[in-house]
Image (cartoon, rainbow, N blue to C red):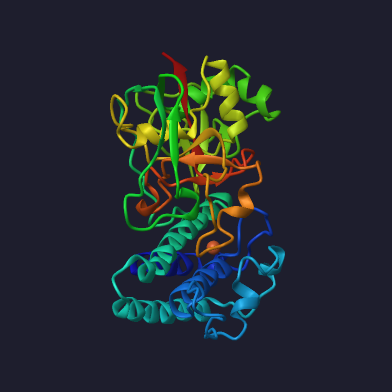
């Protein structure tokens, strides 16, 4: 948690001159609000006892206005742009102070799950907001945040076979689990081959063939352009004049085989799969493969979130956890499960059981895909 707080503070400091010029988009938050909200969440669960069923009311916050301003369930999205009291100095000092108090509380906490879960939840929540800050940086063409990994894809990722398996209930493996992960079941109705992640060069060929336009009505994916000034290396000599580039944060890079396709909607991914004789994997197929139970590990997992064909829905016996509004409001039939983990997400979120969820039309998040092909 200390590292994640330091990363947030570094992000605010690095972008100080940009913090007050944030367009009011539905997909992002003002970063000062976002970091102050993280401090509110840490305080709410780790210091104010809000997750403790024995407490009727949480303790008072350090900032009297905190619940009205910073509880994401209470403050309307657009109102987050109208909080001039959230200055860099005030928000940074608040996060540091809350962080010190959380560390002191953690050092006093008993070492059983019920006592530790609020701290674990806060850690995961921080990680999610770090990724949200990264997609803000991508949306607004800011420099790459320090925590974003830039590792190239392995050049030889193999196809993985997932065998048929009957419905099983997965045991909890100890430690923290989100409410939507408890009672997980898994079944694969027929054996299937999972391809490596679809890469930028393959997607560019489909763009050239008109596939993306047929699927979306758009000539090219969000953040792509044709030609332009080169900044990256292109193995094999000069690029053709009609090469494509994609913007990653504030840099334009070639759409080549070294990068997984990213910032693509589930709808466009599905159309690509259809045109190539495949489909998106199900959540359970990816769960099996990510757990290392297939013919080989998915060597290229963890670069982008991977769209699935599975609607985000509760397992039998679901009940909301400490963070009551985390999952349940998104069990609306309009969200898809994503698996794996992205290079912009801290590694605590790269867990085979973790279920990310977004609406399938989102093409601004760090989501890509692989294909499921018949055996
Ligand atoms: Fe949050």
- Residue located 53% across and 72% down the image: 36
Query: On the rendered image, what quadrant is the N terminus found in?
Result: bottom left
Could you tell whether 167 is left or right of 362 in the image?
left
Identify the residue shown where x is 56% and y is 84%.
Answer: 63
Most foreground residue, 9 or 17: 9
Which quadrant does the C terminus fall into? top left
Residue 10 in view (yes/no) = no
Q: Where's residue 238, x and y in %?
A: 41, 24
Give the percent coordinates (x, y) of residue 357. 54, 45
Q: Quadrant of residue 232?
A: top left
Q: Quarter of the picture for ligand 1? A: bottom right
Q: What residue sits 62% from the left and 25% below the top?
A: 212
* Left or right of 236 on screen, residue 82: right
Q: Is residue 251 visible?
A: yes
Q: Position of residue 368 (x, y in %)?
A: 49, 35
Relative to 217, residue 16 above or below = below
In depth, the one of 61 and 34 nearer the eye is 61
In-front residue for pair 195/308: 308
- In the figure, residue 156 lies in which quadrant? top left
Residue 169 location, x and y as percent? 41, 39
Q: Is residue 212 left or right of residue 162?
A: right
Relative to residue 361, is residue 91 depicted above or below?
below
Number of numbered discs visible in the structure rendering: 0
């Amino acid at each position: 948690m200390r590292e994640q707080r330091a990363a947030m503070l570094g992000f605010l400091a690095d972008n100080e001159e940009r913090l007050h010029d944030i367009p009011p988009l539905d997909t992002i938050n003002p970063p000062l609000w976002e970091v102050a909200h993280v401090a509110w969440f840490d305080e709410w669960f780790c210091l104010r006892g809000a997750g403790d069923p024995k407490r009727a009311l949480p303790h008072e916050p350090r900032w009297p206005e905190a619940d009205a301003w910073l509880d994401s369930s209470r403050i309307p999205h657009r109102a987050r742009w109208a909080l001039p009291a959230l200055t860099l100095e005030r928000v940074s000092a608040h996060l540091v102070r809350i962080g010190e108090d959380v560390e002191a509380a953690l050092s006093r906490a008993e070492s059983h799950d019920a006592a530790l879960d609020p701290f674990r939840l806060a850690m995961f929540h921080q990680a999610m907001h770090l990724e949200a800050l990264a997609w803000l940086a991508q949306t607004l063409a800011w420099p790459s945040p320090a925590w974003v990994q830039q590792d190239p894809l392995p050049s030889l990722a193999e196809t993985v076979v997932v065998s048929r398996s009957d419905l099983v209930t997965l045991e909890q493996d100890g430690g923290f689990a989100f409410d939507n992960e408890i009672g997980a079941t898994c079944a694969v109705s027929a054996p299937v081959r999972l391809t490596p992640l679809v890469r930028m060069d393959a997607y560019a060929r489909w763009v050239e063939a008109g596939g993306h336009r047929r699927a979306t009505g758009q000539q090219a994916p969000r953040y792509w352009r044709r030609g332009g000034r080169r900044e990256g290396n292109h193995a094999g000599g000069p690029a053709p004049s009609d090469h494509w580039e994609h913007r990653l944060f504030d840099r334009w890079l070639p759409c080549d085989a070294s990068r997984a396709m990213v910032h693509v909607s589930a709808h466009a991914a599905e159309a690509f799969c259809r045109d190539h004789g495949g489909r998106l994997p199900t959540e359970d197929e990816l769960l099996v493969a990510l757990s290392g139970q297939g013919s080989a590990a998915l060597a290229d997992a963890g670069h982008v979130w991977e769209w699935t064909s599975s609607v985000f829905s509760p397992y039998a016996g679901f009940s909301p956890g400490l963070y009551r509004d985390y999952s349940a409001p998104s069990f609306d039939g309009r969200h898809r499960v994503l698996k794996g983990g992205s290079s912009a997400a801290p590694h605590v979120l790269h867990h085979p059981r973790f279920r990310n969820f977004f609406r399938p039309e989102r093409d601004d998040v760090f989501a890509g895909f692989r294909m499921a092909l018949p055996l």
